[in-house]
Image (spheres, helix red, strand yellow):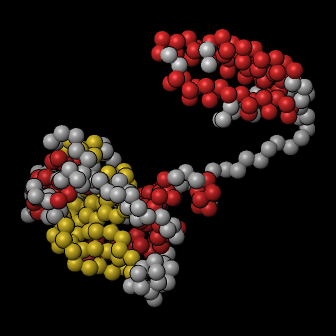
């Protein structure tokens, strides 16, 4: 469309707006010209086909057309919801607007912060763009570990990356504070992973850390996670701990919750095992303490971490992790 054709279309639309004599006609014109699939938005999308030298003038003319048409429609009673028509019946009851609901991920993070808050944990935060030292080296990750490969981690140069876990927040907290330290660290994390029903390249974690100069044991860790499980999933949940390995904890355990669907009897959700893997945990490795300037002979502590999406999927019966990111109101409204 040339500028001359645009001006002609503008004049025609303004004439139609002037002739509109009821609310239905005004709304029809609004949809026709400025709605999502209207003429003006369509021309905006088609500006890539306008010669480069003509684009500034064409875009300015489009903006002027939209402003004039919207003003004309508003004068006819087709303005925004907050504007009142002169002939409106103010005695009619107002429209009922449904209140929004909290996203399941936000809800899990808020509930987790509240649960651990009762145990004396505070919330710590840190940047999503991290250093190699905070994300790997200080967490006792060996140089040959596969998580350091560019096929697994989003690197920006040799020393900068998108954090693969929220554990770097624990490192930053210990570097900035003397013990005792008792924090949880919720936040976004990133890994090069193929998106499917249970995996995503961008997800959320909550990690926890407790370090003190007085003795801290694995029994303390188990009691804290058992308390969290009951508060988050209900009184009937059971917790089990299995030996495992993580570079930054020793000893290390994996934490399972009894399946909330079959109550431990076995079903498709838990793959007939009666248990669902939820978290990794363990006693902080002494080498991690040395990296942050703590004396491992004077302090002890535990750390744990779990995926927020996994907790949300278990708690709310969500079958596909992708549903959490699609912003489908039909799905989100079920979380009310």
* Residue depicted at x 78% and y 29%: 29
User: Residue, x 17% and y 62% (percent of image)?
Assistant: 248
Answer with left or right where residue 12 lies relative to residue 112. Answer: right
> From this viewpoint, is residue 169 visible?
no
Asked if residue 35 is positioned above or below residue 278 in the image, the reply reads above
The residue that appears at 77% across and 47% down in the rendered structure is 96
Q: Position of residue 132 (x, y in %)?
A: 17, 47
Which percent across, then down, holds residue 244?
21, 74
Residue 250 location, quadrant: bottom left
Tell me residue 116's x, y (percent): 39, 62
Could you tell me which quadrant the C terminus lies in? bottom right
The image quadrant where one finds the N terminus is: top right
Q: How many numbered circles does the render carry?
A: 0
Does any portion of residue 332 appear in the rendered image?
yes
In this view, the residue in front, 46 or 284, is: 46
Left or right of 87? Residue 288 is: left
Q: Quadrant of residue 217?
A: bottom left
Q: State the residue in front, 293 or 149.
A: 149
Image-based side of 320 in relation to 247, left or right: right
């Amino acid at each position: 469309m040339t500028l001359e054709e645009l001006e002609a279309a503008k004049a025609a639309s303004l004439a139609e707006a002037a002739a509109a004599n009821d609310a239905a006609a005004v709304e029809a014109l609004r949809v026709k010209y400025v709605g999502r699939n209207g003429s003006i938005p369509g021309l905006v999308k088609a500006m890539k086909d306008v010669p480069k030298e003509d684009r500034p003038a064409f875009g300015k003319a489009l903006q002027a057309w939209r402003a004039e048409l919207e003003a004309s429609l508003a004068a006819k009673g087709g303005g925004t919801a907050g504007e009142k028509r002169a002939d409106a019946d103010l005695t009619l009851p107002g429209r009922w607007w449904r209140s929004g609901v909290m996203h399941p991920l936000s809800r899990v993070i808020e509930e987790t912060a509240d649960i651990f808050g009762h145990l004396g944990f505070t919330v710590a935060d840190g940047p999503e763009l991290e250093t190699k030292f905070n994300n790997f080296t200080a967490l006792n990750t060996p140089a040959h570990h596969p998580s350091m490969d560019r096929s697994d981690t989003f690197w920006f140069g040799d020393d900068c990356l998108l954090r693969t876990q929220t554990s770097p927040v624990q490192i930053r907290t210990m570097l900035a504070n003397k013990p005792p330290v008792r924090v949880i660290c919720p936040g976004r994390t990133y890994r090069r992973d193929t998106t499917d029903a249970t995996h995503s390249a961008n997800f959320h974690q909550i990690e926890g850390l407790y370090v003190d100069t007085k003795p801290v044991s694995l029994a303390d860790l188990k009691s804290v996670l058992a308390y969290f499980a009951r508060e988050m999933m209900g009184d009937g949940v059971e917790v089990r701990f299995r030996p495992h390995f993580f570079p930054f904890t020793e000893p290390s355990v994996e934490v399972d919750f009894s399946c909330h669907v079959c109550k431990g009897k076995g079903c498709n959700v838990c793959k007939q095992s009666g248990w669902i893997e939820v978290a990794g945990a363990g006693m902080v490795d002494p080498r991690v303490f040395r990296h942050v300037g703590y004396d491992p002979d004077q302090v002890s502590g535990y750390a744990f971490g779990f995926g927020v999406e996994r907790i949300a999927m278990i708690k709310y019966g969500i079958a596909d992790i992708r549903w959490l990111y699609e912003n489908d109101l039909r799905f989100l409204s079920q979380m009310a």
